[in-house]
Image: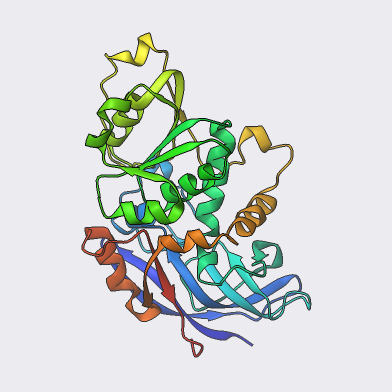
Amino acid sequence: MSTDARAFWVVEPGRGEIRPVAVPAPADGEVLVRALHSGVSRGTETLVFRGAVPEDQYSVMRAPHQEGNFPAPVKYGYLGVGTVEQGPTELVGRTVFCLHPHQTAYVVPAESVVVVPDGVPARRAVLAGTVETAVNALWDAAPRVGDRAAVVGAGMVGCCVARLLAGIPGCHVTLVDVDPTRADIAARLGVAFARPEDLAASRGDHDLVVHTSATGAGLQLSLDLLAPEATVTELSWYGDSRIELSLGGSFHSSRLRIRASQVGSVAAARRSRYTYAQRLALALDLLRDEAFDALLTGDSPFDELPEVMQRLADGSLPAVCHTITYRATD
């Protein structure tokens, strides 16, 4: 017997709507999940919402359980938390995280969900996919005890990276953003905060820089902050946007490097030891840390998601992670 549900779709660039969907009864090895919360990954999801995924990246940027195709209509999203209503006995009644689009209920293979540990509230657990990205980035970046580090871009990913870096003994971390209101979030994360203009005296003095702002100016600043022989770990995804860099200064003489990091593959340094599921389970375990609540900056009911996506895309709704809450009757 199928279950009536509703899902958010991008129906054309810049416009979304909620559509009904019939969810089949779970087969053996599957689970029926009733949604509690989902999170909007502002950077990637607003690019998808605007129809800004480059055509040559359509296959790469497919999300797990996505329906439809870019640019539209497409059902997209990957930060979902819900309760298992049907499935294997050991999972029924458990709160789980799933890389699923925004939908009130859904059926997926049991191996697609990861149990949320005790001590991690369901709403905070929507950050699991972003913390997983941060974990992978630090495996790529390989920070060391005592590093002077900067994270340029105080969005979801940048904030998660900064918090994990702050746990390394002796590591001095500065979160950099053009928005001065992010200073309060940096304080709650236990790291320093600076605007780009505040860093003139510390250029060329950082052992490690992680860039997440998705702007050319942010990447240029990241290079300018590096000490000789150091590396910028680049997490930004630019969609179909082009950026310009000035590489005529210290880039060559100081032998600087830019290295891409992307969560779609487990970092090479840990690929022989961690599966995707183990990496995600690690991210959920790290979310026992209450400091991550600083990233949850707003919440709306599911029915308002089409308007919320428009406001996030045009910048009229400022947010780090805006969450969506589902009613028990959905």
Return the residue found at the far top: 253
Left or right of 271? Residue 251 is: left
The colour scheme used to paint the residues is rainbow
The answer to whether any part of residue 70 appears in the image is: no
Q: Which of 140 and 3 is in front in this view?
A: 140
Q: Is residue 266 above or below residue 69?
A: above
Residue drawn at the location 60% of the way across and 85% of the way down? 2
**In the figure, is residue 180 to the left or right of 105?**
left
Identified at 40% across, 78% down, the residue is: 302
Q: Residue at x 44, y 49 (%)?
A: 157
User: Would you place residue 111 above or below residue 175 in this image?
Assistant: below
Image quadrant in which the N terminus is located: bottom right
Residue 231 visible to an observer of this rendering:
yes
**Picture residue at 36% right of the left edge, 9% below the top:** 253
Quarter of image, res 271: top right
Rendered position, 140 above or below 37: above
